[in-house]
Amino acid sequence: MVDLFERLDPILKLLPEVRRPEVSPPLMTKILYSALALIIFFVMGQIELIGLSGQSIQQVEALQTILASDIGSLITVGIGPIVLASIILQLLVGGGFLKLDLSLPENKARFTATQKLLAIILSFFEGAAFLGFGVPGIGFLQAMPGMFLFIVLQIAIGSIVLLYLDELVSKWGIGSGIGLFIAGGVSQGFFWQVFRPADQFGSAGRIFTIGQSLIEGSPYAAFVGIVPILFVILIFLAVVFAEGMHVNIPIAMGQTGAGGRFPVKFLYVSNMPVILAAALFANIQLWSALTQGIPFIKDVLSGLSWATQPPRVGGSLSLIEGLLTLGITSTTASEVAQAMVYLLMLILACVVFGKFWIELGGQGSKAVAEQLDKSGMSIPGFRRDPRIMQKVLDRYIPHVTVLGSIFVALLAGLSDITVASLVSGTGVLLACGIVYRLYEELAKAQLMDMHPALKAFFGEK
């Protein structure tokens, strides 16, 4: 209902925002802003919270990559509140619980501002959740006496800074801040796990352990060790191949009827369904761990947590490494069953979020048809009418949305059961997609710098 959003207007107007540039900045300026945001993100990850007496994060270590977080630092909750706020509002608006016509610019602005307000509220809420809401013995972080509120404030401020860094990158930089932080965190974690030098306990990066296995005459152990690295390369190649797949819909432009093409990419939904699904699964696991003392709720969330997390053999090995090392046993058989359930849950979540995302993002058949009509374009052989164009686009966009969502879900799920010992498999998929799209954004920005007339075509000022 618009009335609810209108009542929030006085509060929403008080929220600070990053001013959008009047003229699109040059490419080098965009790169500098994006680099600055990424540097601030890494620095915040090195600043420890003041007032902690201890922490226990074993249950949520895998979530740090997905949420671009580093528990115990200023980015303890990472982008969790931002993505969760997006999920909540998408479900409310997409499900019809809140009526808001997002085709109107003022309603889009309300939606974005409300999402920002909700993300700020959730920053405090999730900060308190990580501390077990101040209840001794509950939570992943333990606070010194009298430091609970101060630690929650630090966590919330860190998340709010990420919120505005995301806005800064979106308006002044390249791509999105959320994607940049995820890719940065995944890349950092992957290279550390692969190339880190040996420490005082003899633990070293994967490259060094593979070399040690070869020196000791254990080629099979070396093969098992290199398998996750090979899968990372295969995932990247699969993403690049899928990004190049598209269907071209012929269009006629203007009164002259000059020919053109409207490409509908196979990955039309990008990797957003996986980001939203991963954030949802992360929150399920978080609340499952925080409600272990509550009967019934504990059982429900424990079951959901089991179904929404990839299996780990022996607590650390990915499923593929476990099968290569141990073979088929009762333990690995149960892990295979969990992997199948996890893949199914991930596919369902990605399809739902994929359909919501294209509608809310103005990429549905109706929205695209109206955009083409306003731009003076039509489909050859059909009457120039947005309703006719919508029917033609309905032959492609809904089906591509579902197929693309299933593909990214399968790729993310298979990544989780093959490379988990190095880094989050979902994180690897997200990073590959983000890096590829960042490359596309850079190429587009460079093209517009070389040919300023193209800025109007791409909607830039």
Image: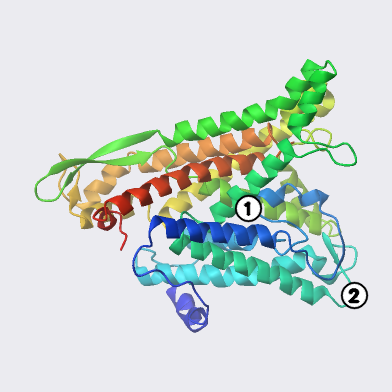
- Reading the image, the residue beneath label 2 is 145
Give the residue at the far bottom of this rendering.
Answer: 10
Q: Is residue 95 visible?
A: no
**Residue holding disc 1:** 279
Which amino acid, mark 2?
Pro
What residue is drawn where x is 74% and y is 63%?
A: 47
Classify 352 as above or below 97: above
Question: Residue 140, how many percent across, how many down?
Answer: 82, 59
* Between 16 and 358, the one nearer to me in the picture: 16
Numbered-mark total: 2
Locate residue 140 relative to residue 155 in the image: left or right: right
Going from the N terminus, do you reach mark 1 or mark 2 first?
A: 2
**Residue drawn at x 64%, y 27% as measured from the top left:** 230
Residue at 51% x, 71% y is 114
Name the colour scheme: rainbow
Q: Amino acid at mark 1?
A: Ala
For label 2, count other residues whose C-alpha is less than 10 Å away and answer few (under 14), some (14-19) or many (20+). Answer: few
Most foreground residue, 270 or 3:
270
Residue 321: percent from the left, percent from the top?
A: 75, 27
Element under disc 1: helix
In the depicted structure, whether residue 173 falls above or below residue 223: below
Q: Position of residue 94 (x, y in %)?
A: 47, 58
Q: Is residue 81 above or below residue 409?
A: below
Q: Quadrant of residue 319?
A: top right
In this picture, is 333 found above or below 283?
above
In screen coordinates, is 442 left or right of 46?
Answer: left
- Which dot, 1 or 2, sits closer to the camera? 2
Q: Is residue 341 visible?
A: yes
Q: Secondary structure at mark 2?
A: loop
Name the residue: 78% across, 67% down.
Answer: 49
